[in-house]
Image (cartoon, helix red, strand yellow):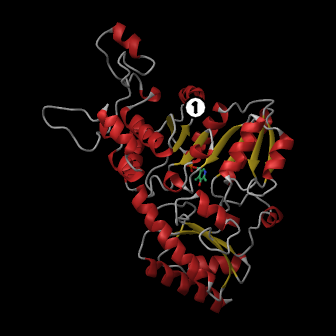
Amino acid sequence: MAQQQRRTAWDIETVLVHSGRSSHIESPSGTPTAPPIYASTTYLHENMQMLDTVFDGTTPEGQPAYVYARHGNPNTCALEDALTQAEGGVGTAVFGSGMAAIQAALLAAGLTGGAKIVASQDLYGPTIGLLRKVFVPIGVELALTDLCSPDAAAFIRAEQPDIIYVETLSNPLVKLVDLAMIGEVAQEVGAVTITDNTFATPYLARPIEHGFDLVIHSATKYISGHGDSTGGTVTSSKNTLLNQLKHYALMLGAVLSPFEAHLLLRGLRTLPLRMERHCANALQVARFLEQHPAVARVYYPGLPSHPHHVLASNLLKCEHYGGLLAFELKQQSREAAFRFIDSLQLCLPATTLGDVFSQVSYPATSSHRTLTAGERKSMGIADGCIRLSVGIEHVEDIINDLDQGLQRATELG
Ligand SMILES: *Cc1c(COP(=O)(O)O)cnc(C)c1O
């Protein structure tokens, strides 16, 4: 109990460094400081009566109990506990990928034939694909709009949706959703609120504090941070939704493997430290790009020129604006963008983000490739738009690489 009380008083840095340690096995031959990886699919119990008692996941004393890996495992439970504390929820369910987590969150929120969902038009491409190609065909009503706009509240009141789905920070222009405002309107119309908090991480924003019901992560990104594990998480602010989530997790079967859970918990321990550096580097890189003659425009919420700079200063952790930015080349063409990316020597041409390495992508041929040129244009994604996930390398090395890349792209143009 003393341990529990102390824990709730700890700051997120301390919580994450020590998370998962409570699940260690105490052994007279020595207690490991790092949790072992439990590869076992099946757990044996003293007798049939005991197996029957623990079948639903807890001992009579309320301790976690394991029966079969799809139902839960010590490594996935340790990761769930850590995320629950980081996001300030009542519980978490983890999945084999971010997309699996999104599907389960939508089902748990009640998205089924006849239900209506209002979602941001800027969502991660495959999320829009999931809504359009899996949920709409079974009778879901989908209304996409710009939920970062001041008109969002009026739109929600007019639509009266059952569910509202946003991303805390949008891709690739790093727009912000006013979570508190959306949370309030959702309460008014009785909608369940879901946000994908992948870009912000719980270090920068904790949407449950702003009234959100479900918080999703593609743990493949900042939580892993090292480009070596795929996973997804959903943290709930309410027990009713958590029970639904666990229920769907069990049936959909898109479980996280114990090995990935081990890596993701390991990643989570250094998340605050990495985010500090990602944010500091990104701000310097954004300032460098903003004054560069080959760059037309920079989108980074830490710059006063970003339309959501003030909201970002209120919503995100003080003076921290994330590791992602986008910018437009003055030469607004796919050829110039490809030349720029191909001439980079340090930043990796990668479709992912949030790793320790700096990564660049061209949204028109990656995250937004299924959209038409007209649709991209209406979302503000120009032909010269490049996304940069700023890594934790020395900032001068990143800046020098971008500078030589911009020069090469311009010379040859
Ligand atoms: C990558 C990503 C996802 C999907 O996650 P996977 O782990 O690739 O399934 C969902 N949302 C956002 C914002 C992402 O960046």
- Could you classify mark 1 by the number of other residues whose Cα lies within 10 Å: few (under 14), some (14-19), or many (20 or more)? some
Amino acid type of disc 1? Lys
Quadrant where the N terminus lies?
Answer: top left
Q: Image quadrant for the C terminus?
A: bottom right
Foreground pick, 336 / 299 = 299
Place of residue 99 in the rendered image (x, y in percent of width and height, measured from the top left): 60, 44
Nearest the viewer among 111 and 192 is 192
The residue at the far bottom in this view is 411
Q: Position of residue 90 (x, y in %)?
A: 51, 34
x and y, in percent, of residue 216 in the image: 58, 44
Front residue of this view, candidates 399 and 2: 2
Q: Is residue 73 left or right of residue 364?
A: left
Mark 1 beta carbon near ligand 1 (under 8 Å):
no
Residue drawn at (35%, 35%) of the image: 4
Left or right, 349 with reference to 268: right
Q: Say above or below: 306 vs 29.
A: below
Instruction: Name the residue tied to disc 1.
Output: 238
> Total number of numbered labels?
1
Q: Quadrant of residue 238?
A: top right
Q: Is residue 2 above or below residue 400?
A: above
